[in-house]
Image (cartoon, helix red, strand yellow):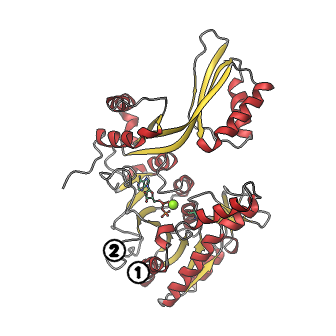
Amino acid sequence: MATIVMKFGGTSVADIERIRHAARHVKREVDAGHKVCVVVSAMSGKTNELVALAREAAPVHDAREYDAIVASGEQVSAGLMSVVLQEMGVPARSFAGWQVPIETSDAHGSARITNIDPDLLFDRMNAGLVCVVTGFQGVSPHGRITTLGRGGSDTSAVAVAAAVDADRCDIYTDVDGVYTTDPRIVSKAQRIERISFEEMLEMASLGAKVLQTRSVELAMAKKVRLVVRSSFDDPDQVPALGENGDWQGPGTLVCDEDEIMEKQIVSGVTCAKSEAKITLRGVKDNPGVAAAVFGPLADAQIVVDMIVQNISDDGKSTDITFTIPDAEFDKALTVLKEAGETSLEFDSISGSKGGAKISVIGVGMRSHAGVAASMFRALSDKGINIQLITTSEIKTSVLIEEEYAELAVRALHTYYGLDIAEA
Ligand code: ADP
Ligand code: ASP
Ligand code: MG
């Protein structure tokens, strides 16, 4: 007998019919004798609706009440999933984050899970119940409902899997695995059978929204066996997990690098849109200048991504360019102009919204020279101008104009031989 966490995303619980379909996947595992915790997202579109309602009520609202509002979507789907399971003859009970409890920090809207006490879940599973846990939410040290940031149900699922020491954490979604790039953008994208935690982490943080970044970090740290698979499969046509948690089914296994025989130079291509760029020219080049620029931005909770600082020609002044989300552009300009009046000296500030960050990712890059150069060539062949570049051991990212994003992703996907072969 194994313990499994099964997470169903928004499209997988979009209506009662889809919930019934998802519940049949759960029943298959229960019938095979496994202990199951289900983690659910809100029904598709629900969280967006709730966020819009909160904004309509007050453009600037109390973060604690924002969480109380947006967390409600998951409570509905957890209740519905339990009722549907019960109707199928599978004993089930729903649990909100605070009931488990899933303890989090008090950073409302982007809280981090600090602890999950597994006793209640163990107790109920041992009594033969399927525990249906609300994703995306927890409880703060002050006893308030918190949410984990958009897409956070993936993280809830991995955290529950770690807490109950699950043999597997299956993320059921609307695609049948992790692809070489977003299959909705590139029809020739291929499903990846196995991907390393590190590559998945890069892919998630660089734009592949199939898993929330934090969920991959957590799975890597806690050694959770993670599978991304489709809830749309016929529940009777896919095998249940084996007794020891063995499974040879469809989907993508996210695992340690040493479980992967064939290491690709490039495993995937990602795209993150709505990136704004800001350039400060003639910044006085003293020790501590970077801190003077990025300190006030951090204080204003603005997350800075790519950073380029030029070597100063005259040893007196330098130019600094960096990227932030489009949504933070106006706030960042205001913060820096204010800093310019006090702690920071520069000649001018400029910037623009509407960039896209395109990245190629692969553990094979560690041992292969020239991936960055070939990437630049492939883009220049399509006439695409590169504005900024950053690299790490297993990825190279460039900032380009958003209107060329799809063209760039397709070109790189083809260039690195990732296109699925024509049948
Ligand atoms: P859920 O509601 O199940 O959490 P999401 O919408 O959050 O689902 O994530 C699934 C979506 O992620 C897919 O529909 C797909 O368009 C998108 N996606 C982006 N990049 C990738 C990728 N590399 N592989 C698979 N899916 C991807
Ligand atoms: N319902 C939340 C969202 O839409 C969490 C999730 O689906 O993972 O962001
Ligand atoms: Mg998701």
Q: Position of residue 168 (x, y in %)?
A: 47, 67
Q: Amino acid at mark 2?
A: Val
Q: Amino acid at mark 1?
A: Arg
Q: Nearer the viewer, residue 154 or 116?
A: 154
Q: Position of residue 138 (x, y in %)?
A: 68, 66
The residue wearing badge 1 is 28
Give the mark nearer the N terminus: 1 vs 2.
Answer: 1
Task: Specify whether 377 is left or right of 227.
Answer: left
Count the labels in the image. Answer: 2
Task: Specify whether 63 is left or right of 18.
Answer: right
Q: Are marks 1 and 2 in contact (CB under 8 Å)?
A: yes
Image quadrant containing the C terminus: bottom left
Instruction: Tell me, for residue 238, which label it has, or none.
Output: 2
**Crowding at label 1, few (<14), some or many (≥20) Cα neighbours within 10 Å?**
some
Residue at the image position 46 percent from the left and 62 percent from the top: 225
Q: Position of residue 28 (x, y in %)?
A: 41, 81
Q: Is residue 192 above or below residue 314?
A: below
Residue at the image position 73 percent from the left and 62 percent from the top: 57
SS at mark 2 in the image: loop
